[in-house]
Amino acid sequence: MIDNGDDPYLWLEDLEAADAAAWVRERNAETLSALTGSERFAALRAEIREVLDAEDRIPYPGWRGDHLWYDFWTDATHPRGIWRRTTLEQYRRAEPEWDVLLDVDALAAQEGENWVWQEVTVLRPGYDRCLISLSRGGADAVVVREFDLVRRAFVADGFTLPEAKSSVCWIDADHVYVATDFGPGTLTTSGYPRVVKRWRRGTPLAAAEVVHEAQVDDLAVYATHDHTPGFERDFVGRSLDFYRTEDYLLTAAGERRRIEVPEDAQWDVHREWLLIRLRSPWTVGEVTHPAGALLVTRFEAFLAGGRDLTVLFRPDPRAAFSYHVWTRNHLILATLADVRSRLEVLTPGPAGWRRQPLAGVTESDHSSVVETDPDTGDDYLLASEGFLRPATLRLGRIGGPVETLKREPAFFDAAGLTVRQFFAASADGTRVPYFVVGDPEGPAGPTLLTGYGGFEVSQTPHYSGGIGRGWLARGGSYVVANIRGGGEYGPAWHRAALRENRPRAYEDFAAVAADLVTRGITTPAQLGIEGGSNGGLLMGVMLTRHPALFGAVVAHVPLLDMRRYHRLLAGASWTAEYGDPDRPEDWARLRRYSPYHNVDGDRPYPPVLFVTSTRDDRVHPGHARKMAARLRAYGHEVAYYENVEGGHGAAANNEQHAFVWALTLEFLWRKLTAPPAPPRQRSSDGADERDPSAV
């Protein structure tokens, strides 16, 4: 086993230690003093906060099956938020009348807790009870409490779970599936539940019946109940890692029937249909279906051994399946073609699956399905937006009319700005797409480049009032890079930067940066980059491997120590993405790009800002703490800010979100528009922070 006992900053991983807390306070004070005292910062923060709290932004609703429109809303009056609902008739109005179900601000004040809303699960049918998940300070760990929707009150003797990374699912009014921390031995090495139980109302949690278990080295366990009338079913399974599962239909007699799809395939059951989305090629009989294909068959026939599979989507080099949603009688299929959205409706019939475009989709915008309710009908909510075009929300019915319900206001003046898409050539010749938002006639100037490149997550066009006001309105350009590791071109695009191929994502990002300079959009000194989580790792790699390409770097809630990431919080769940540092062959590859292990005291770096949260229980704040300490000891210019709450989002409410983004944009603008800095010197307190060369 590889240990990090020689890490001089290991003490900064201790979230309870007084010396580590003092170090954080000192770094925060330095950063706030340097960046937040100007009138420009105060105005920027106020402008971003105004966007986040705007009363005329779209209240995106959720449907629960009872024909009511639910919404969780935050604004200046309700910073923690209110959960509310209304009718379609009311929602159509400019100022609907809302029925407030729960005021989280009032609850937090009453109970003396820093509650942050996470999610809710409503009982179907009945719709009179729900399970509400609240976190302290925005952490992933939640407290679960049963709520009476008729009385507008928590149920005193209802289903309640203490703080943990739990999952709950209604079976019926008196039974739930619960996966939580049941005590020693019931969590996986990733920190997620290993055991799921069936819990009956009125009985202690300890008496709940075990229905399925995962192995300790698995990612997690799950159990779900499908409440579709006439198709009620129960499923259990193990998440073997981030991409592989082992799944079963749980019969009424307690029998587990294996769903024989590939372990890395994603599947979904709706009424009589089974959908299978492949991550790797699958040979069935004499036919090999490619990775990225979407297949459909009848569920019961498949369980019985039938393999009559219909191909609903086959990928090509420029197009990939993105997601699907069901209505009562139809399937809506979303795909990406060179990162531009396409939506179509598929309808089963005697002659096969009929296709037609989804009504209401605009050609020039990125459109996504916000909501459907497969139990009740074929209605859908559709949102369309672009980098420069605020969102429009439409209500449609397949085969029927489409009406515009809401339009987001414009939060900045887009006159003279355009959106352009370019392709950069990566080191191996791969064409990497990216979007540039800005003035096409302007000279090379301050440019903010962002990317992610991991976990098959696609970066698609979206409207951001904060970026518009805080960056574009100042004259900056904004760039989104669609690098490998993401899902823009399906599983192959992701797999191309998986584990041992991870450096390709970094080569892609560097290629985009160089292409921006070649096209005259910016210069290295005027090019700033920002990314969060896995995108924060991307930022750390750019800082240490390609420092000459950039003028400033911002990393939000980043992974940076790739030798210990799997031992910190949820890190073990990501070994399928990066590799296992305890395996020598994996560590040999990780060591070559792990930002924390590649800091060079003799190489000039651009200034960097790290932003994290003490309450982030997904990516440990120790990553950012240790990286900042080591850079400081070498004399590099580094700023650090750690919010005391906020979880993996680094902010728990709109005020904190506005502050974090104002801090980010102010830092970048200062560094990208300032004259060159004088040569650096090593930190005067480096000795107190231990010897940086020992890592």
Image (cartoon, rainbow, N blue to C red):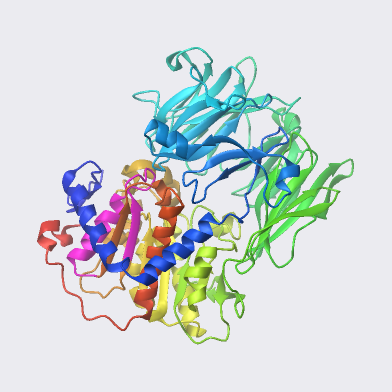
Q: Is residue 600 left or right of residue 276?
A: left
Please identify the residue farthest to the left as the structure is shown.
Answer: 687
Where residue 511 appears, as percent x and y from the top left, is 47, 74
The residue at 45%/78% (across/down) is: 514
Where residue 639 appears, as percent x and y from the top left, is 28, 64
Q: Is residue 301 left or right of residue 78?
A: right
- Asked whether residue 307 is in view, the answer is no
Number of numbered discs visible in the structure rendering? 0
Question: Quick one: quadrant of the C terminus?
Answer: bottom left
57, above or below 467, in the image? above
Which of 362/30 is in front?
Answer: 30
Please identify the residue farthest to the right as the structure is shown.
Answer: 350
Where residue 659 appears, as percent x and y from the top left, is 40, 59
561, above or below 684, in the image? above
Question: Quick one: quadrant of the N terminus?
Answer: top left
The residue at 54%/54% (across/down) is: 456
The residue at 60%/64% (across/down) is: 461
Which of 434/491 is in front?
Answer: 434
Q: Is residue 413 left or right of residue 24?
A: right
Where residue 311 appears, as percent x and y from the top left, is 75, 48
The segment highlighted magenta reads 609-636
153, above or below 86, in the image? above
- Asked whether residue 313 is in view, the answer is yes
Check if residue 611 falls in the magenta segment.
yes
